[in-house]
Amino acid sequence: MVEPLAEGGSVPEADFPADCRMDHTVNTVCVVGLGYIGLPTAATLASRGIEVIGVDINPQIVAAVNDGKPYFPEPDLDMLLRAATTLGKLRATARPEPADAFVIAVPTPFNDDRSPNLTFIDAAADAISPVLAAGNVVILESTSPVGTTARLSKRLARQRPDLRLPEEGENGPFDVHIAHCPERVLPGHMVRELIENDRIIGGLSEACAEHAEAVYSIFLRGTAFRTGAATAELVKLVENAYRDVNIAFANELSTICDQLGLNVWQVIELANRHPRVSILQPGAGVGGHCIAVDPWFIVASAPEQTRLIRAAREVNDAKPKFIVSQIRERADRLKHPVIACLGLTYKPDVDDVRESPALDIVVELACDPDTRLLVAEPNLRALPPPLDERANVTMCDTLAAVREADIVAILVAHSRFRRIPQEELMRRMVIDATGLTHRSVSMTR
Ligand SMILES: NC(=O)c1ccc[n+]([C@@H]2O[C@H](COP(=O)([O-])OP(=O)(O)OC[C@H]3O[C@@H](n4cnc5c(N)ncnc54)[C@H](O)[C@@H]3O)[C@@H](O)[C@H]2O)c1
């Protein structure tokens, strides 16, 4: 069933069972999972005067948050967190405590067979169920396959038969309200985007959406759009699949151009002069734990209907191997090649290496014992595993790596790499997976 969106209003009555109206007052919020999403959310709520209990199973994270120190770099988060802990509005702990609202922001990875792994959500549900009370709202923020919010409600209902929990298609009234409100913030801009981005509020019932919206209205300046939980789940997945499919098109163009001996950056730049064409840029692949993962959740739900989404995933997953083959083709011409690998993170100017294609490329190259790899990654202090155990891999300053190398592989378009003097690159074999060295056609006229 597809529910039309309603901006700051209610969805059509037919889509939601009748439900009781309850007090929407939110004084305390328990945020389960203090990662990239949960911690900024907890700090933002606390900055608005809400009593926030932050919960994480990682004791180091609990200690860091109670010290008022973010454990990952994110502009303005340190200031927000320090203020929240100093004022006593945010404290972290290992177990959920009673609250008006629960926000679940735990990981949703995939299994080896690419099916969704919901064990973190299950564990979070099991942890909050003993402290749930009538009048509470539980919001699932983790990116989830369609049906996960309803599954969460069922799991809570099994553990708390004393409470009436919403089930899809059932009429209320309910004691506890459940909603899915996916997150779409951009790392590096989280504190601003949390407040300014529009928000999809997907309730299992209309009252569930209303209760969830009351939590976001504490800090949201963007528009809240209410809909059903299943639609909200698919909306988030579709956003990331859309990006993946469009990046796959650019990545496929890059391999076509290589085959035809053409410059893909020039082809895309010129094609984009068409008023209705806007092709994205190719790269070393697609990484991070969102775009590289979430499309598989759609494939798992509708395997027969997802030929394009699956193909896009396969094209993007194949791109690192293509880059490796380009580098090896050059390296095979040398006896003891020295390769400068510029960048390890999954995208420019972040410190995150989750699902990073650049990391995969360097790990694969490191399997050649005769090859020396000089890795420049200005956003990391040390080589991440498994590179930290490879004898032929050394971490280097950017210029030192370039100057010592026979081959320079630009894997991530970090700002720092834009300042490498042209003459340093001209003397070496350069494989630029990012387009960083491409001079635009208008500049070459
Ligand atoms: N990071 C992003 O940019 C982003 C953007 C949009 C959506 N999301 C989605 O948000 C969700 C969370 O992502 P993230 O990047 O914050 O993950 P993360 O790995 O940074 O943080 C998750 C945290 O949850 C904790 N945790 C795991 N199980 C727990 C449990 N049972 N109880 C308490 N804590 C628990 C972990 O220790 C970790 O600190 C995922 O579904 C992700 O796909 C992330």
Image (cartoon, rainbow, N blue to C red):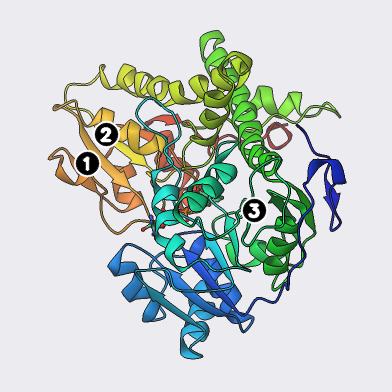
Element type at mark 2 = helix
Q: Residues within 10 Å of mark 1 (few under 14, many from 20)?
A: few
Q: Which residue is mark 2?
A: 363
Query: Quarter containing ligand 1?
Result: bottom left
On-image quarter of the C terminus? top right
Using residue 247 as the reference point, say whether residue 195 is left or right of it: right
Res 256 → quadrant: top right
Element type at mark 1 = loop
Cα distance in 3D space between marks 1 and 3 = 39 Å
Using residue 137 as the reference point, say whether residue 373 is left or right of it: left
Instruction: Compare residues 276 and 155 and report the one nearer the observer.
Output: 155
Using residue 119 as the reference point, say whether residue 163 is left or right of it: right
Q: Amino acid at mark 3?
A: Ala
Q: Which residue is mark 3?
A: 179
Q: Residue at x 60, y 74 (%)?
A: 45
Mark 3 vs mark 2: which is more N-terminal? Answer: 3
- Number of dots carrying numbers: 3
Instruction: Compare residues 206 and 358 and report the one nearer the observer.
Output: 206
